[in-house]
């Protein structure tokens, strides 16, 4: 049963913008913090940004000031607005539902991923 579905990835030039979306099942979305992770080829999956149920946010240092995570509680959707994209942002981006308590702790709820490629 698919419960998290990402969309919005693609090819963009350096300096460009993309907005990723993740549609979640209502039960998962309403009871969890949400986050975006990314995984580049040959590297581990890293946390990019997280948002609590109340809307508090946290970002990896590498994306602070460029990315913004938000959630629409009426639509059960979490977004990642990515601006000033760099080639090193190239990765598969995954949506996750989890717990935020000082740190973000992922549950085993993952989407299928969406590819973001930043290249000229």
Image (cartoon, grey):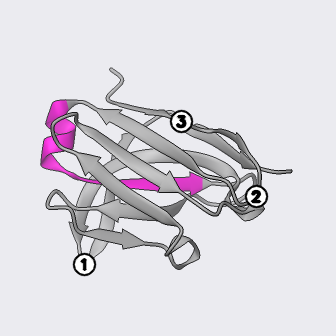
Above-or-below relation of 24 to 116: above
| Residue under the point 58% across and 75% down | 62
For the residue pair 27 and 79, the one nearer the viewer reads as: 79
Nearer-N-terminus badge (3/2): 3
| Place of residue 29 in the rendered image (x, y in percent of width and height, measured from the top left) | 21, 41
Q: Are marks 1 and 2 in contact (CB under 8 Å)?
A: no
Q: Nearer the viewer, mark 3 or mark 1?
A: 3
Q: How busy is the neighbourhood of tag 1: few (under 14 within 10 Å), some, or many (20 plus)?
A: few
Q: Which mark is residue 28?
A: none
Quadrant of residue 25 within the rendered picture: top left
Residue 101's place in the image compared with 47, above or below, is below
Looking at the rendering, the stretch of residues picked out in magenta corresponds to 26-38
Numbered circle sitting on residue 102: 1
User: Which residue has dot 2 on it?
Assistant: 14
- Look at 77% across and 60% down and name the residue there: 87
Q: Earlier in the sequence, mark 1 or mark 2?
A: 2
Task: Using residue 3 as the reference point, say whether residue 18 is left or right of it.
Answer: right
Element at badge 3? loop
The quarter in which the N terminus is drawn is top left
Residue placed under numbered mark 3 in the picture: 8
The residue located at (23%, 36%) in the rendering is 76
Q: Disc 1 on helix, strand or loop?
A: loop
Residue 35 within the magenta-colored segment of the rendering: yes
Q: Position of residue 91 (x, y in %)?
A: 67, 51
Q: Nearer the viewer, mark 3 or mark 2?
A: 2
């Amino acid at each position: 049963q698919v419960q998290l579905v990402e969309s919005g990835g693609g090819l963009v030039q350096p300096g460009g913008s993309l907005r990723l979306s993740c549609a979640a099942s209502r039960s998962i979305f309403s009871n969890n913090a949400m986050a975006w992770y990314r995984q580049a080829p040959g590297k581990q999956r890293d946390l990019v940004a997280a948002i609590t149920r109340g809307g508090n946010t946290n970002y990896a240092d590498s994306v602070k000031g460029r990315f913004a995570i938000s959630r629409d509680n009426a639509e059960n959707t979490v977004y990642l607005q990515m601006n000033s994209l760099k080639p090193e942002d190239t990765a598969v981006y995954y949506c996750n539902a989890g717990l935020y308590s000082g740190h973000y702790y992922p549950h085993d709820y993952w989407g299928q991923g969406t590819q973001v490629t930043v290249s000229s």
